[in-house]
Image (cartoon, grey):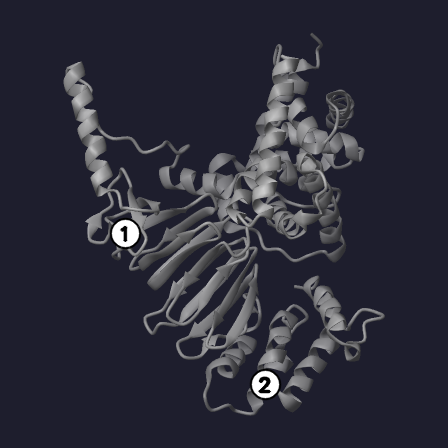
Amino acid sequence: MADDQRDRDAERRAKDREAVARVLAGDRAAFGPLFERYAPMIHGLLLARRGAMNPAEADDLVQDVFETALEKLASLREPEAIGAWLAQIARHRAVDARRAAKRTEPIEDHADLESEAASPSVRMEARRILDLIRTLPEAYRETLVLRLVEGMTGPEIAEQVGMTSESVRVNLHRGMKMLKERLA
Amino acid sequence: MSEDDYLFDKSGKPDPEVEELEKVLGSARYVSPQRNRAERVHGRRAKPARSRVFLYAAPLALAAAILLVLALRDRLRPEGPSLAVTSLAGAPRVDARKVDERGGRLGVGAWLETDQASRADIELQQIGHVAVGPGSRVQLVSIAKNEQRLQLERGVIEAKVLAVPRLFVVDTPSARATDLGCAYRLEVMPDGGTLLRVQTGAVELAGEGRQSHVPAGATCETRTKRGPGTPYFDDASDAFKTALRHLDFDVQQDPRTLDTVLGAAREADTLTLWQLIWRVDGEKRQRVLARVMELVPPPPGVDLASGPGAFKAYQDHLMTHW
């Protein structure tokens, strides 16, 4: 199973390398699959930041992060590490946004979707738990949000964000322990 | 095997507490713009279009029927690149051919029309969707590696595009809208003017020698032969918006109009004023710039007299107030 995961990771890295090369060669549409692949991870990292940010605001910033990435793509030295690179841009972008207390309007369509997918009480409970997760140390809250909100597995988190699987496992374990204490 | 396996990689026996958290927190999960559109169109997770085949036919006849349907579909499919079209309501048409529940294709040069009871969805290649409202007429102008272009002759569209700037362009009678990675609503009025409202990201609107940058939460109007007006935030005062409209589009200008715009402006309206600076000249330009600086002073160390770099730095600072 570990070998399967390694093979999948290697294949994904090769696809990322190829996509980056195509974008730099002028094929901007090749950026689309990179966006689809990494947007949930970016969204999760933005949601995990301290300070109130609702999913709609995080959606706006996801777009910002990828715009920045597209502008700066030529400066990426290791295309295989694009996930970790995007994660850094997202973290910086979240800090900038919090500093500027940027005005963003709720996205009406996303609010409609949330109401279709989850009842108000579920949404309120989700916000309460998200607020608690945000009180945890940074390493724990990021991995918890990526796992529990975005539905990524530990190996996927490790591969996309650029951590080892062991670190992700430890963060999830410790983060969950602290979250359970705060939920109790 | 460890007790954390389910938490780590969803293997092993599910942990009920983790499952409960996944269920609740999953409501905040990121949903891509394309999945948003597909799920709203069909009210469920989208399935690919399928041909209808009579399943109770004998196997050989079944195979022949399948081949016939595929051959007919290929004959009806436009030559060359095209975009998938889905009917959302009523009976939209592509070049007078009805788009049914199986969907259709919009080829280069073809027109998609909706009547007052129809709506349709156009799937852009890899980058998003365009919802076409009732009473609309839209043409696919071109598809290339670095650009997908539509022409909106009348009616309204809502576009949701992935974060790849300048890949999607819409021409209208009075302006060209270039997507900068966003979601927006664009309506062509009966007189050929347009109303653009940006929900996320930004759009660049250009025409008749004018250019407007329209960010999230802002609206921009255009008029034929005048091009785009100056964008404004939707929550600006009515007095501000009305005076701005006169300033942008009246041929004969009342000298008091600029006074009203400047007097009614708030800090956030520096979005409008900053773009207005480049549309007026002489003494008016100085007055607009002075009002911007009064509402949002330049940051320390930025001296606008020192050149373009200072203006860029000031613009970056202003953007944190928009």
Q: Viewed as shown, does residue B136 lie left or right of A30?
A: left
Q: Are marks 1 and 2 on the same chain?
A: yes
Residue picked out by circle 1: B118
As measured in the structure, the alpha-carbon distance from the residue carrying label 1 to the one carrying label 2 is: 43 Å
Q: Viewed as shown, does residue A88 lie left or right of A44?
A: right
Residue picked out by circle 2: B258
Of callouts 1 and 2, the N-terminal one = 1
Q: Residue at x 74, y 51 (%)?
A: A98
Which part of the image, by quadrant, shows the N terminus of chain A?
Answer: top right
Under mark 2, the amino acid is Leu
* Residue furthest front as drawn: A25
Q: Could you tell me which chain the residue with mark 1 belongs to? A: B
Residue sitting nearer the eye, B278 or B253: B278
Q: Quadrant of residue A134?
A: top right
Asked if residue B302 shows in the view, the reply is: yes
Q: Quadrant of residue B29?
A: top right
* Residue furthest top as drawn: B1
Does residue B261 sit above or below B83 in this rendering?
Answer: below
Under mark 1, the amino acid is Ser
Q: Residue at x 69, y 80 (%)?
A: B289
Q: Position of residue A20 (x, y in %)?
A: 61, 41
Q: Residue at x 74, y 27 (%)?
A: A179
Q: Position of residue B19 (x, y in %)?
A: 60, 21
Say which element carries label 2: helix
Say which element carries label 1: loop
Residue B62: image tag: none
Category of crowding for the residue at label 1, using alpha-carbon neighbours closer than 10 angstroms: few (below 14), some (14–19), many (at least 20):
some
Q: Position of residue B36 (x, y in %)?
A: 46, 41
Q: Position of residue B107 (x, y in %)?
A: 30, 50
Residue sitting nearer the eye, B23 or B292: B292
Q: Residue at x 73, y 22 (%)?
A: A165
